[in-house]
Image (cartoon, rainbow, N blue to C red):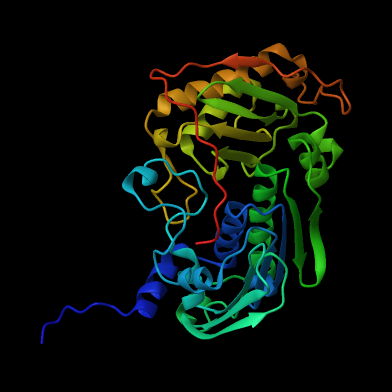
Amino acid sequence: MGRIQVLDDILANQIAAGEVVERPASAAKEILENALDAGATTITIEIADGGIERLRVVDNGEGMSPEDATLALKRHATSKLNTFEQLQRIATLGFRGEALPSIASVSRLQIRTRTQGAVGATRVIVEGGEIKEVLEAPGPVGTEILIEDLFYNVPARRKFLKKGATEATHIHEIVQRMALCNPGVGFRFIKDGRTSIDLPSHATLSARVNALFGPSVAEPLRPVEVDGAYAISGLIGPASAARGTARHYYTFINGRFISDKVVRAAIQAAYGQRLERGRHPFVILHLQIPPEAVDVNVHPAKTEVRFVDSGVIHRLVTRAIDEVLTADPWTRANPGGEGDCQAGAPELPVRRSVVRPRQRCPERAAMPVRPIG
């Protein structure tokens, strides 16, 4: 008998979980992305013990049929692409079809889901990657994912998790990022029975920032906007209010939060000598670029990307921010180090400019609404 053998599905999913599910926040991120892909306008996230004991996500998206609810638990089963050409133009947050089966393989998981027009909901009970029951159940349109006892069957992974309070902080940051990227979606985050975030739908990014961080952060911010096939919008803070940490770089590419050295370097270059060494501004940037101009499939967590032409991105971000900083004196830090921006300063009009890439790409296709997968 040969030494090489094909791994069974559960073991393969547990191996995949080692890359996809680093901690409860990783699972929360994947489930939230699926909810947004499904067109949810309200999402509730509920956790106990930092999401280790319990992580529950409820959305009002389009839901799944009974057949799709069970098929979604198979590895590489997805509704979001089926051709190589679509892989070259990723327009959804999830696409690999690994998240749900990977999470299910290292937890006790339940799915309750219902599509519009269905008589009732479908409830799927999974333990350690094995489907135990598929039942009819009452429930609203949308999907509820319940994850309990994360890594209960992989104790070597569970022992590396931090205390519940630390894990909860990571999930809080994930929810904040999702909320900043989707101001039109209502988010509610409940931690150990207490509501930590409660956001209705907001009409503008400024309103969302005010609700999350308060007027002292929101009011001094100024808008940045660039039109074109490569587009940018967002809010930037004055150099005088810079902080000693880069945690408040909220950068998004085509609706996806990213942590990218090119974008960060461009932000730093734009502020330049306006910032003291080691200081970082409060920045929220949404970049919309042709999907074929960026590869989002370079890391399991999907927070790292690769640009076809990083120079275009660097110039776009640097020039867009520099225009606002140059035009608005409030952004300059005075020599004494005291901020010269005044809370409640009059809102300035959005300045529009166009940064032309070396090669023009077609406009980005609208993001389709698709079910979880």
Between 4 and 277, the one nearer to me in the picture: 4
Residue 153 visible in the current orientation: no
Residue 134 percent across, percent down from the top left: 55, 83
Q: Residue furthest left?
A: 1
Q: Quadrant of the N terminus?
A: bottom left
Residue 363 visible in the current orientation: yes
The quadrant holding residue 49 is bottom right
Between 151 and 41, the one nearer to me in the picture: 41
> Residue visible at 70% across and 70% down?
47
Where 239 falls versus 10 (above or below)? above
Where 11 falls versus 46 (above or below)? below
On the rendered structure, is 86 left or right of 161?
left
Where 266 falls versus 142 (above or below)? above
Residue 365 percent across, percent down from the top left: 50, 35
Residue 52 percent across, percent down from the top left: 62, 75
> Residue visible at 49% across and 40% down?
260
Q: Residue furthest right?
A: 344
